[in-house]
């Protein structure tokens, strides 16, 4: 699974994978490990933190012990004053119930609701800036892939593409239903203001550059994604507000380019 902090949304991933070279880049990198990669699912941003004290401003994050997955996500949380706690999904409910952690993120609203988090928390801070989208895919041994007939390979590619598009609308519908379920359960839902989200974006940009410059493959992926964002922004911004999503004020592309070369 590939995730992003405050960068791509689900539509961006679909665009990038299908038309801006993302699929080729997946296979270039996975190919180094003898695998073929087929992206078959995508979700939009995750829920956000679920807590028993409200998180409305960045000050509310100070010192909080928050379950959060991901390298970049943890670094971003630390810059915001919180403390990352890593734990398996199956441990979150009891950790919230017993006060072992101050809050947690896990997944999209429908998955969170099925996990019963409304039973052990009172507040939900949106949006989930830590994971603005997720991609799911299947890794196939390249030798096994090469042994398949061209027709079977094409069938699998088409099936993955079809499911990629289906998964977006399916998960958005389920997330919408779960949002109402959380409200009906009495959960107080808050949203960070635009100034706060702009500050989160600034710090996310710092983390992206730091991470990219530590790993050539990471730098190459981020460079490709930022080139897509810059290219698509021409049409997306010109056709706003009727187009898809936002053109984020992301990291300096030249800083990423320097690390990729």
Image (cartoon, rainbow, N blue to C red):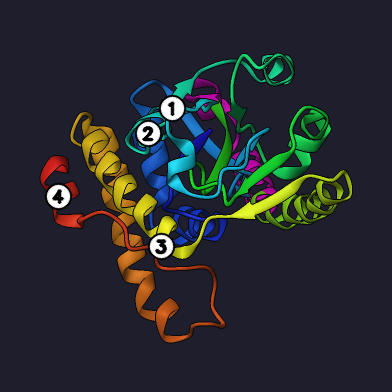
- How far is disc 4 from disc 3 in space, using C-alphas? 24 Å
Q: Earlier in the sequence, mark 4 or mark 2?
A: 2
- How far is disc 2 from disc 1 in space, using C-alphas? 6 Å
Q: Secondary structure at mark 3?
A: helix
Q: Secondary structure at mark 1?
A: loop
In the picture of the structure, the residue carrying the numbered disc 4 is 255
Q: Position of residue 42 (x, y in %)?
A: 61, 47
In the picture of the structure, the residue carrying the numbered disc 2 is 81
155 falls in the magenta region = yes
Q: Nearer the viewer, residue 156 or 165?
A: 165
Name the dominant secondary structure of the magenta segment. helix
Q: Earlier in the sequence, mark 1 or mark 4?
A: 1
In the picture of the structure, the residue carrying the numbered disc 1 is 63
Horizontal arrangement in the rendering, residue 221 relative to residue 254 (left or right): right
Q: Is residue 150 visible?
A: no
Q: Is residue 145 above or below residue 176?
A: above
Q: Nearer the viewer, residue 172 or 135?
A: 172
Q: Which of the labelled discs sits on residue 217, or is there none?
A: none
Q: Secondary structure at mark 2?
A: loop
Task: Indicate which label's residue lies in the foreground, 1 or 3.
Answer: 1
């Amino acid at each position: 699974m590939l995730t992003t902090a405050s960068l791509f949304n689900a539509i961006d991933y679909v665009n990038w994978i299908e038309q801006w070279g993302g699929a080729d880049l997946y296979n270039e990198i996975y190919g180094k490990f003898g695998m073929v990669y087929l992206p078959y699912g995508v979700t939009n941003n995750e829920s956000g933190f679920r807590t028993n004290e409200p998180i409305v401003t960045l000050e509310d994050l100070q010192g909080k012990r928050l379950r959060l997955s991901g390298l970049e996500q943890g670094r971003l949380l630390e810059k915001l004053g919180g403390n990352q706690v890593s734990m398996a999904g199956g441990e979150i409910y009891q950790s919230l119930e017993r006060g072992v952690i101050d809050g947690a993120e896990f997944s999209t609203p429908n998955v969170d609701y099925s996990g019963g988090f409304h039973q052990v928390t009172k507040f939900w801070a949106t949006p989930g800036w830590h994971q603005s989208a997720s991609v799911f895919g299947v890794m196939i041994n390249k030798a096994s892939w090469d042994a398949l007939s061209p027709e079977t390979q094409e069938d699998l590619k088409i099936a993955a593409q079809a499911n990629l598009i289906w998964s977006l609308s399916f998960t958005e519908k389920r997330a919408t239903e779960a949002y109402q379920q959380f409200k009906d359960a009495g959960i107080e839902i808050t949203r960070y203001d635009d100034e706060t989200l702009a500050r989160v974006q600034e710090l996310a940009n710092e983390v992206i550059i730091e991470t990219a410059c530590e790993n050539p493959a990471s730098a190459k992926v981020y460079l490709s994604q930022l080139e897509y964002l810059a290219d698509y922004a021409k049409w997306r911004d010109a056709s706003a507000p009727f187009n898809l999503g936002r053109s984020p004020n992301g990291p300096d592309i030249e800083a990423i380019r320097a690390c990729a070369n």
